[in-house]
Each structure stands twice: as C-alpha cells, then as structure tokens.
C-alpha cells in the first residue's frame, strides 16, 4: 500500500520533517553546467518538492553531503586543538539506487577499512536516512547499474516516484508514518518502489580470476590510448559516488599570529591529478595518464572487490557524463572484459 | 560513536641531535610508547603547516620516550627544524605493521639499509645488539650517498664491535679502507646467504629501487622471496586506511605495511 500526495500536500510533510531533519535532494543550478548555457544538478538543502529535480540524473553524487569537497576537521589555537562541530539535525537524502549503493562503498572505506571507523564520516553517516527516488524504467543513456548489480536497494525509509504534479510514496520505515497521518485515509494508492531492471547500456564486467591475468591486464596495451586522451583533470573522480580519497592540509589564519590560530582541512583528492603520490624528497608513482587510468579503473572493478566483496563501481555513468574529453568508462569496462578474455585464451593456449 | 583518533597529542621534545647537515634526531616523551613496535610510524603535526608520516627509529617503554630521524625536505619537516628542546610537537600514532621480533629469533639475520632507510630498522638492530644470544648470526650492510651522509656513526661503531657491518658509499671520499659502490655488489659476499635457508631472514629498507634490486640480488644468491622483508614508503595523508594515497592494488600500505614480506608484495603494481 502506498500514498499519492499532491506536491502541495507533500510540501506540508517536508515542512514537518524539516523540524527534525536537514533534507537534501538534487537541485537545479541554472547555467552552472559543464558546457555553456547548461544547468548543473547537484545536491543541496531543499524545503519543497519543486526544488527537487526528478527528470534528470544529478550531475554530482550525494557523497558531498557526508564527505564535502572541503571540510574543516579541527581548529588550532594557542597550542590547543579542538575538533570541528556539525549541526545536530538528523539527515534525509533523496537519492537513487546508484547513490544509495554508493554509500555502501563509502562505508567500506570509512567505516570498515580498519579497526577504527573514520570519526568525521561516521558522525554524519549515523544521522542519514534515505528517500529512494524511483528512476525512469531504464534509467538514462549512460546508466549501467543493472550490469554492476547496483540497480536495486532496500536501504530506504521512504521511496517516491514523481508524476509531475504529485508524488507516489512508499513508507517502508514506519517511524515516518506519523508524518503522513493526515493523508493516510484519503490518499492511498497502489505503489511500491520499482528498481530499474534493464538499462539501454548492457556491460559484461571483467572477471579477473588469477594474479597472472591481473598482471597481464595491467601491462596490456589498452591503457596506452589514455595517454593521449585523458587530461588528468580528475573530474570523473569528483562526481563519482564512490571516489573517497582525500588530502589533509593545514591553513594558518595569519602568518605572524602569536596564537598560531589555524585549522586542518580535508579536501577531495584524485588519483588522476598530479601530486597524488608525491612524497617529500621527490619520489612519485604513476606519472602517466595511462597508469593513473589503469589504477582507477582496476580499483572500480577489481581491487575494491578483492578487499570488500563488492565492486566499487555502481554504474551511475556520471564519469562518462562529466569527462571533458568524452572518455567513456563503460567503453573502458568493455575493453577490459575483452582484454581479460583474450588473456585467458592466451594462458589456456600457453598451458597446453 | 568511536573516539576521534585523528586529534594529535602534544609531546615534549626531550633532545635534538644533529645527525647530518640536513637530518636531526628527535627524542620526545610519548605517552603511548607501550603500544609501539619496531618499524612502525607516526603522523607528526605542525599546526598551520600540516602532517607528515615519520618512522619510529627507537623507543623506550621504561623511560617513556621515542625517537625519530627527520630530514629537512618538506613543508612540515622544515618547520620541525625550528623547534627546540622543551617545545611541544603534536603527533598521533603509532601506525602500521612493523617487524615481528619473534620472526627473526634463532635465525641468521642480515639487515640491509640504504640512506635514511637505516632509521626504521635502527630499533630492530639495537634490540639484537642488546640481545645477541637471540640470533644465530647477524650481519649489517649499510649504503649511504657519501661519508657526510652516514647517520648514527657512533652507534655503527658500537655495532661493529659485536657483529660484521659493511658500510659503503656511492661517492668515494678517498679515505683508506673505504668501501664504495651500491649495496647490491656486497650481497654475494655476505655470510648469511651461505647458511641453511630455513634459518635465514633478510630485512631490506631504503629507496624503492634500492629495495627492488637488493631483493633481486638476494634471490639470485638463493634466498627465497618469503625470507625477505621490506618496508614501503608511500605518500600518506591519514595513516589509518581512509585517504587512499598509499593504496597499491587491494593493499593499504599504512594498514598492512609499511613492513611487508617480499613474496607477498612482489605482485603489487603502483
């Protein structure tokens, strides 16, 4: 059983929710898009349904709510250190299945990659509940979430589908029922969240089943084309829902200050961008675009899985949407698959 | 919620010893010294400038101090050189997997260090220098750029009294009896490689290329890769497996390293 509310009715619900929750959703930012005269859709706080962009996939992922591009983590003053504070409110995020599954990958890194969860990630993550946004039946042209098996999710409190003037709503977490009590009698409808079951784009992910296959794939000539094509700007990693690398750096408020007042920040980092591996003294690793592409691509469809069991890539296609050089990650996955199958045949041949 | 383990703690500088023209040895009072293992590292902070990962070169649980060697080469280390005895240096750690003493006990051990690579193995050397009965034999092979860059000279002189130490420099000074050239050319002359390989362990620490070629030299001389131990150095920003800078394939150097078994890392590919 679901509910169908007009946008105006749902706005009443949002108003009530906003007493307890900071509510985030994909929102339109006119003329801030990738190309001239295009809009940008990214996450921001919202107060009404009309703020939410349902008809387009957001350019940026929802990760910025929990891992902002730039975040102050502590302050320094007179030899003392104090951690930064965040707002007390709980957090609700309108997100698609790819983004919600993206958070599972962020959880792998920030909560499960060592005995100690990351304090700064966890303090926001603990406050989050999701409102799943139902996608168009096949998603969009660059989506391949079915191929990455991240098309569905059960990690939501509410799910919604916009019809334009109204919203169909599934209430999964009964804690939220009270917010809809006024409409429970007269607005019922048959609605249950439906995942995308087929994308236009269908990929076969590479199955790297031995160390030898992996080593040969790393040395495969397929990576060379990216030396000429990739400009190492890191755009793909900025809007990827699962790229989580960051660099810590300090800022001093005044160079001549007696108090040493300043702060420590985290800034999003990218393995495509110069400096990512630089060490004091001049050592550096992976200087070419091809090496960096290989490093990222294998992380997305192999390395993370080796460590945590799930592939990192959630098939949202935002890297393809965002690349200024029109490099397609989905094409790259196909090339990796083809290369891996070819390598396996070679190895089979060698062993005979 | 777990506690915030990224907040540094202020540690008093107890002593500063000038080691070379660009390297100082710092001794600080460290409250969690009981948690330290040989070969681990710390994240040092200079508020307003940043953090850097530095190996622990020695420590004393009884006296509550630890030492690290700092080369003046970067934003943070330049600032550390402005500090004096009695000043406080914020830090967090210790981090990473170090050398397991038990793994080397009762064995023929050779340690090869290149340049400041001696720093992370110094406490291990000092441990066996103080407990020679715990090893069947012990050899040291140390390479430096030139005589001026030899670190821990007086300690090396002490070690030499107890077990064989080869010190070689890349750039000869012309002094008599000076050994010159890369460490790799001295590997085949070590006694360790003539022993039963079941009771041999080799530790190699230095710049990436030095470790790679030295390990290959030992393997060429019959030492199995699983008997070789190396310590990796990578860019680190968090030191606790979150920031991603030190990752190689599915391995995080800050968590699974910096000390690795060579056989287990031979496939890793930056």
Image (cartoon, grey):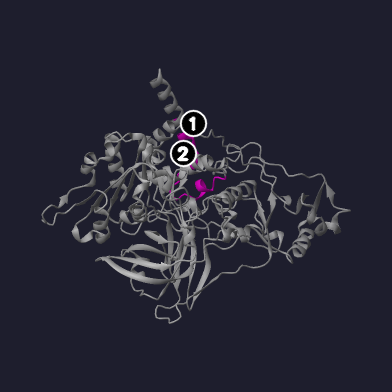
Residue B27, percent from left and from top? 38, 67
Q: Nearer the viewer, residue B125 or B130?
A: B130
* Residues at discs 1 and 2 in contact (Cβ within 8 Å): no
For disc 1, the neighbor class at 10 Å (few under 14, some 14 to 19, many from 20) is few
Judge whether A257 appears above or below B269 on screen: below
What residue sits right under mark 2 in the picture?
A: A332
- Going from N to C along the chain, the mark reached first, 1 or 2, is 1
Judge whether A190 appears above or below A20 on screen: above
**Residue A220 can be seen, yes or no:** yes
Residue A241 has which mark?
A: none
Q: Nearer the viewer, residue B114 or B128?
A: B128
Name the secondary structure under disc 1.
loop
Q: Nearer the viewer, residue A216 or B168?
A: B168
Find the residue positioned furthest to the bottom.
A258
For disc 2, the neighbor class at 10 Å (few under 14, some 14 to 19, many from 20) is some
A67 to the left or right of A213: right
The C terminus of chain A: image quadrant: top left
Give the Cα separation between the discs numbered 1 and 2. 19 Å
B191 to the left or right of B203: left
Judge whether A279 appears above or below A139 on screen: below
Magenta stretch bounds: A316-338
Residue A209 has which mark?
A: 1
- Of helix, strand and loop, which mostly describes the magenta segment? helix
- Please state the chain letter of the residue tagged with numbered disc 1 in the rendered image: A
- Please state the chain letter of the residue tagged with numbered disc 2 in the rendered image: A
């Amino acid at each position: 059983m679901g509910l169908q509310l007009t946008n105006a009715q749902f706005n009443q619900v949002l108003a009530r929710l906003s007493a307890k929750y900071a509510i985030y959703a994909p929102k339109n930012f006119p003329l801030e898009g990738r190309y001239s005269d295009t809009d940008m859709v990214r996450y921001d706080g919202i107060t009404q349904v009309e703020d939410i962009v349902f008809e387009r996939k957001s350019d940026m992922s929802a990760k910025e709510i929990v891992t902002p591009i730039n975040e102050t983590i502590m302050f320094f003053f007179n030899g003392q250190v104090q951690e930064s504070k965040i707002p007390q409110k709980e957090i609700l995020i309108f997100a698609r299945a790819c983004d919600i599954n993206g958070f599972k990958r962020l959880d792998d890194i920030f909560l499960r990659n060592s005995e100690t969860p990351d304090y700064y990630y966890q303090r926001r993550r603990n406050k989050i509940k999701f409102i799943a946004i139902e996608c168009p039946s096949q998603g969009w042209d660059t989506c391949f979430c079915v191929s990455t098996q991240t098309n569905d999710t059960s990690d939501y409190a509410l799910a919604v589908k916009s019809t334009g003037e109204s919203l169909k709503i599934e209430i999964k977490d009964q804690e939220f029922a009270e917010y809809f009590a006024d409409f429970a009698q007269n607005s019922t409808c048959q609605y249950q969240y439906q995942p995308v079951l087929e994308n236009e784009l269908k990929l076969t992910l590479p199955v790297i089943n031995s160390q030898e296959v992996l080593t040969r794939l790393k040395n495969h000539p397929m990576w060379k084309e990216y030396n000429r094509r990739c400009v190492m700007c890191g755009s793909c990693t900025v809007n990827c829902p699962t790229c989580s690398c960051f660099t810590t750096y300090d800022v001093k408020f005044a160079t001549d200050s007696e108090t040493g007042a300043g702060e420590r920040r985290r800034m999003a980092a990218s393995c495509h961008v110069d400096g990512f591996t630089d060490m004091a003294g001049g050592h550096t690793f992976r200087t070419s675009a091809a090496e960096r592409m290989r490093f990222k691509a294998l992380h997305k469809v192999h390395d993370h899985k080796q460590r945590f069991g799930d592939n990192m890539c959630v098939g949202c296609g935002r890297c393809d949407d965002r690349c200024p050089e029109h490099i397609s990650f989905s094409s790259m996955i196909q090339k990796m698959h083809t290369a891996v199958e070819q390598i396996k045949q070679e190895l089979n041949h060698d062993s005979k | 919620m777990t506690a915030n383990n990224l907040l540094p703690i202020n540690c008093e500088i107890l002593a500063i010893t000038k080691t070379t023209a660009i390297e100082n040895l710092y001794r600080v009072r460290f409250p969690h010294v009981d948690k330290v293992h040989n070969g681990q590292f710390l994240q040092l902070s200079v508020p307003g400038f940043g953090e850097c990962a530095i190996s622990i070169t020695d420590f004393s649980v009884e006296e509550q101090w630890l030492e690290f060697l700092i080369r003046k080469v970067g934003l943070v280390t330049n600032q550390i050189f402005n500090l004096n005895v009695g000043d406080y240096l914020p830090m967090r750690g210790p981090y990473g997997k170090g050398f397991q003493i038990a793994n080397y006990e009762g064995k023929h051990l050779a340690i090869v260090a290149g340049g400041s690579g001696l720093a992370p193995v110094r406490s291990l050397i000092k441990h066996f220098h103080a407990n020679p009965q715990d090893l069947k034999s012990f050899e040291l092979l140390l390479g430096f750029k030139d005589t001026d860059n030899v670190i821990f000279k007086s300690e090396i002189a002490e070690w030499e009294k107890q077990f064989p130490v080869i010190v070689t420099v890349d750039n000869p000074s012309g002094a008599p009896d000076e050994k010159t050239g890369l460490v790799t050319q001295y590997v085949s002359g070590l006694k360790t490689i003539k022993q039963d390989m079941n009771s041999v362990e080799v530790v190699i620490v230095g710049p990436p290329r030095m470790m790679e070629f030295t390990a290959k030299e030992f393997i060429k001389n019959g030492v199995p890769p699983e008997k070789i131990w190396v310590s990796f150095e990578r860019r680190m920003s968090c030191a606790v497996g979150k920031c991603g800078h030190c990752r190689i394939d599915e391995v995080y150097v800050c968590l699974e390293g910096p000390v690795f078994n060579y056989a287990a890392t031979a496939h890793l590919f930056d």
